[in-house]
Amino acid sequence: MRLLIVNYEFPPLGAGAGNATGHLARHIARNGHDVLVLTSGMAAKGLHGISIQDGYEVFRIPSLRRHVEQCSPHEMLAFTSSALLHAGRAVRRIKAQVMIVFFGLPCGPIGWWTKKVYGLPYVLSLRGGDIPGIPYGSLAACHRMLSPINATVWGNASAIAVTSVGFQELAQRFAGRVGKRVLRIPNGVDCESFYPAPFHLHEAPVKILYVGRVVKTHKGLEHLLPAVKKLVKNNRQEMELEIVGDGEFRIELEILSKELGLQDVVRFSGWARRENLLSHFHSAHIFVHPSVGDGMTNSILEAMACGLPIVTTPSSGQHLVEDHVNGLLVSPDDSSSLAEALAKLVDQADLRAEMGRASRQKAIGLSWEIVAQRYLNLAHSALSSFPAKRNSGAVSIPAVRQF
C-alpha cells in the first residue's frame, strides 16, 4: 500500500501523538509499504520541505508554529489551511491510496477534503482532547461549536480508533450519532530504546519524575506540588521532584513551588529532546502522572519500559498499571491520595524495585510493531471496502483517482 499519514505534530514538534506517528510510520515502512507523513514545518528550527528518515518521507509544510512543545488554536487552524493547500502534492508524490489521520481536529478536515477531492479513504485516530465530552475545561465549548465539523469528519471515516477504554466509551457516544463504531488500538512502546538503568538507585534523594506537557487542569499538576509539600512536612526531606516538559502552566507552577517553599525540592528541567529522555528515566526512582484524562500515555509506557513504578490515576493508567503490582492508582484531583501513594514508594526501596520489575515485564508485551499491524489492517480494510461502497451506491462519493 501507499499511505499518507497526517498529523500536525511530528518529532521534534509536539509530544505523545507525534512520537506515536513516528513509530507507526517506521514500522509500516518496514513492512514494505510506501509512507509519507504530512506535518507542520517550523522554519526557525530548520524544519521545512521534504526529508527521508527510517525508510519513509516527511513533508513539512509552512505553518505559524512558534513553539516546539505546544500549538495554539490559531496555529492549529493555520496548519489545517496550509495542509489543505499542500495535500494534493503529498497525494501525488507517493500516489497515495489510503490515509491515516491523527486528531479529529485540526487534521480531520484534511482527511475529509482529500477523500472528497482525490477519493482516498481515511482511518481516523483520536487522541483525547479531540473527543467531544472530554473533561478539558474550555474545550467543551469548542466541541459544541465544532460539532457539525466533527460529525462530518467522523461520519466519512472508514474507521475510528482511540487508545484507551475510557476514550472508547466517550467517543462512542458521539460516533453513534453518525452511525460509526469506535475501535481501540493502544499505544505501543519501544523497549529497545527505553530500558532499565544498568543499576538500581537506592541512594538518597529519592527522585520522583513527571514527563509531559505542563498544562493546567487535565494533567493534574496543580495537585502534584501540594502532594509533594505533604511529603516534605512529614520529614521526607531526602526526595525531589523533577518536571520534564513545558507549557503555559509552567510559570504558575514555579510561583506555586516558591509559595510552598519547595524551590529546593522541585526542579523544572524544561522540554527534553526525545534522545535525552532516557537519561531522565534512568535517574528516577518513581514516575508520576496525575492526569485526569490522558488515555494511554506514552510517557507512562516509556517509564514502564525503563523499569519504574508508576503512580497515576485510573483514567491515565487503565490497562497499564495494575494497582499494587507495577504501581499505585490514586483518585484524580486528590493531592492527599497522591501524597499517600508517593510516600509509600519513597519509603520502601524494595517495593519500588519489585514494582519496577513488573512494569518492565508489562511493557515488553506492548510493541509498536503490533500497533502498526493493527492500523495496517484497518487501512487494508478501508482500501478494499471503499470501492465496494462506492459501487454499491450506499454512499455518494467521488471516484477513486487512478495514478
Image (spheres, helix red, strand yellow):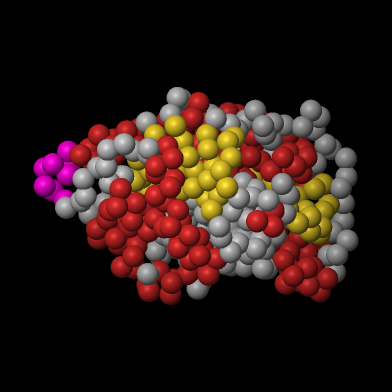
Tell me where residue 347 appears, x and y as whole percent: 79, 46
Residue 218 counted in the magenta span: no
Name which residue lies at 49% across and 47% down: 38
Q: Position of residue 57 (x, y in %)?
A: 53, 38
For the point 58% across and 40% down, the residue is: 51
Question: Residue at 34% of width from left, 62% of height from top?
Answer: 150
Residue 31 lies left or right of residue 378; in this view the side is right
Coordinates of residue 260 in the picture (x, y in percent): 81, 71
In the rendered image, residue 189, in percent from the top left (x then y), is placed at 57, 36
Residue at horizontal 79%, vertical 28%?
Answer: 198
Quadrant in the picture for residue 52 = top right
**Viewer-proximal residue among 193 and 68:** 68
| Magenta-tinted stretch | 388-395
Figure check: 288 above or below 21:
below
Q: Nearer the viewer, residue 27 or 51?
A: 51
Query: Is 318 positioned to the left or the right of 120 in the image?
Result: right
Q: Is residue 393 magenta?
A: yes
User: How would you classify the magenta stretch by its main secondary structure?
Assistant: helix
Residue located farthest toward the left when viewing the structure as drawn: 392
| The N terminus, quarter of image | top left
Residue in front for this viewpoint, 249 or 257: 249
